[in-house]
Image (cartoon, grey):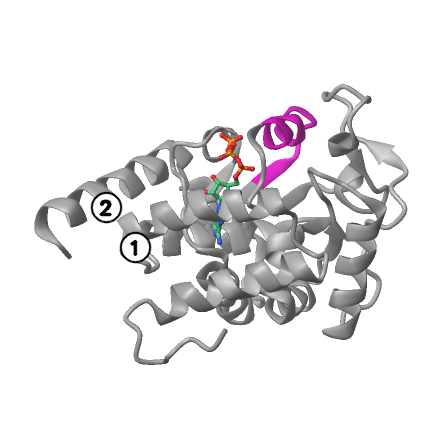
Amino acid sequence: MTIPKTHPRYQSLCIRERLTDGVRTGITSQVGLIAHGRGEAFDYLLGERTTGSAMRAEEVAVAMLLAARRPVLSVNGNVAVLVPDEIIELGRALDAVIEINLFYRTEERVRAIADHLRLHGASGALGEHPDAALHPLPPDHPRSLVCKGGIHDADVVLVPLEDGDRCQALADMGKSVIAIDLNPLSRTAKAATVTIVDNVVRAIPNMIGLALRMKDLDADRLDDIISRYDNKETLLAAIEEIVARGVTGV
Ligand code: ATP
């Protein structure tokens, strides 16, 4: 469908279109559309912009990923269709491993995502051959599958649009977890070490810019940025920003 550029919700409609195309090509799951709907509702309330508190969380997240020994970026079907070039570029800027990791894992979908990322220039993304598990989760569900050399061994993991259960499992394994989640009330948002309450389509490009600006900061400076962060304060700020916008309309 052609969306008229003059439509007041042009960007939002284009994102919907990319996700439904993603379902057609087997990259995004139907459940991913529902997850997007929840995110879209919160984005509407936030004014579809990166708030001040989200930008600060993005800076802390980049500091953590730059300071990490084994940084990993997790990619699911929504991320693969919404920001394929950008997630690859962020991986390069941070020297981070990319792992395709799905809650509703099917071999066909992992392959479709891997092919899609390769088409966009990725080389070496993990996820097609998981050989380890998130041990706090019951082993009877594919959501526990991960890769050695990827999420299994990471010290810092970026998980855009993650489920609360898996976010908690990663934290229980002693990893620093950076979530991108538009819902500041989700279990993921509360369980993560750093929660970026922003849309992935804005957060990942912002993080590329930050990574390029911050890549030469020394370890003490990165530690200083990380140590001043408080996730509860960030979530409260996001809720306050939603309320303030509702009252004042800005
Ligand atoms: P939880 O288990 O953490 O309580 P949930 O059950 O809502 O959350 P999912 O159904 O897996 O978890 O939803 C994924 C999350 O991703 C939702 O909270 C939604 O707000 C968020 N989300 C969806 N689309 C985007 C997007 N484009 N950018 C950022 N976040 C998004």
- Three-letter code, disc 2: Glu
Q: Are marks 1 and 2 in contact (CB under 8 Å)?
A: yes
Q: Which residue is mark 1?
A: 52
Query: Does residue 24 sit above or below 190 in this rendering?
Result: below
Q: Which mark is residue 38?
A: none
Q: Position of residue 36 (x, y in %)?
A: 49, 48
Q: Which of the two discs, 1 and 2, labels the residue nearer the N terminus?
A: 1
Q: Position of residue 249 (x, y in %)?
A: 12, 54
Residue at 75% across / 42% down in the picture?
A: 151
| 31 with respect to 118 (left or right) | left
Residue at 32% across / 58% down in the picture?
A: 48
Q: Position of residue 238 (x, y in %)?
A: 30, 43
Secondary element at tag 1? helix
Within 10 Å of the Cα at label 1, are there few (<14), some (14-19), or many (20+) other Cα atoms?
few
Q: Which residue is mark 2?
A: 241
Query: Does residue 72 sit above or below 201 in this rendering?
Result: above
> Mark 1 against mark 2, which lies toward the viewer?
2
Q: CA distance from mark 1 to mark 2?
A: 9 Å
- Three-letter code, disc 1: Gly
Magenta stretch, residue numbers: 165-177
Name the foreground residue: 62 vs 3.
3
